[in-house]
Image (cartoon, rainbow, N blue to C red):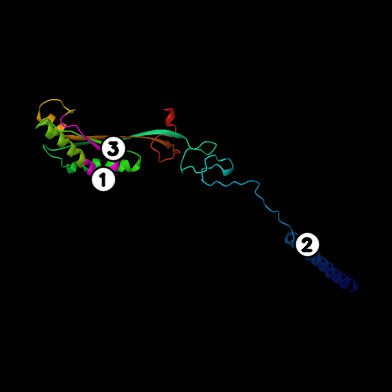
Amino acid sequence: MNSRIFYQYSALIFASLLTACTSLDEQNTVDEYQYQAYPTIEQPADLADSDGDGVINARDLCQETAGGSKINNDGCGKMFNSNQQQQLHILFAHNSSVVNPIFVGQIKQMATFMASYPSSKIEINGYASKVGTEETNLTLSKERAEAVKQALVTYGVEPDRISIIGYGEQEPEVDEESELADTKNRRVTATVVTHDNVIEKEWTIFSRLPKDWETY
């Protein structure tokens, strides 16, 4: 009987000690993580990239690079010369300076082209067939050139960017006496060529040229 009581008390004492140790370990664990000091993270250098070209400001020599530009290690785009050309070739009826509606599309395209290149200017050349007097044909050629000029102005081209010249029956496109020649010689022509330095764009899946087009 006494032995049984002794073992029961011993078991209770052991359980109490075990519980106390477990509680102490848990408390120590909580304290360890609760009071642990976290390190302060400091960025060693300024990694800002204002123009988003992938080169940080600290070593970007061109900090206003246009989006999508092909750049070098200094963050600068590659420049190349771009020559663009737009032409007008408008035919007129006999003894008329009225622009036929079928040629309005050409005029709109030229106006759009010149809007894309604000520094461009255009010289409009008017011509006439050999039918009639030289004086009449000279006047008519100027009127045709003026009609095309006014159409360009209507579509947004500034008048001071346009000059006109009337050649009359001089400089025919077809130098012969025939109805076909007369039809081709009653005309207005103009060509605008631009010479601009353009930044090469980085290749994307939407580019028209292959990625390594320079090696073709």
Rounded to the nearest angstrom, the CA distance separating label 1 from label 2 is 87 Å
Write down the quadrant of residue 31 in the picture: bottom right
Residue 138 vs 150, above or below: the answer is above
Mark 3, Cα crowd under 10 Å, few <14 / some 14-19 / many 20+, is: some
Please identify the residue farthest to the top as the structure is shown.
176
* Mark positioned earlier in the residue sequence (2 or 3): 2
Image side of residue 169 versus residue 116, left or right: left
Type of residue at label 2?
Asn
* Mark positioned earlier in the residue sequence (1 or 3): 3
Q: For numbered disc 2, what is the local secondary structure?
A: helix
Place of residue 131 in the rendered image (x, y in percent of width and height, measured from the top left): 9, 31
Place of residue 23 in the rendered image (x, y in percent of width and height, measured from the top left): 78, 66
The residue at 13%/34% (across/down) is 137
Type of residue at label 1?
Val
Camera-side residue of 123 and 34: 123
Which mark lies nearer to you, 2 or 3? 3
Q: From the image, tell me which residue sits under label 1.
A: 153
Q: Which residues are magenta?
A: 148-169
Rounded to the nearest angstrom, the CA distance separating label 1 from label 3 is 12 Å
Q: From the image, tell me which residue sits under label 3.
A: 122
Place of residue 42 in the rendered image (x, y in percent of width and height, measured from the top left): 67, 50
The residue at 15%/36% (across/down) is 139
Q: For numbered disc 1, what is the local secondary structure?
A: helix
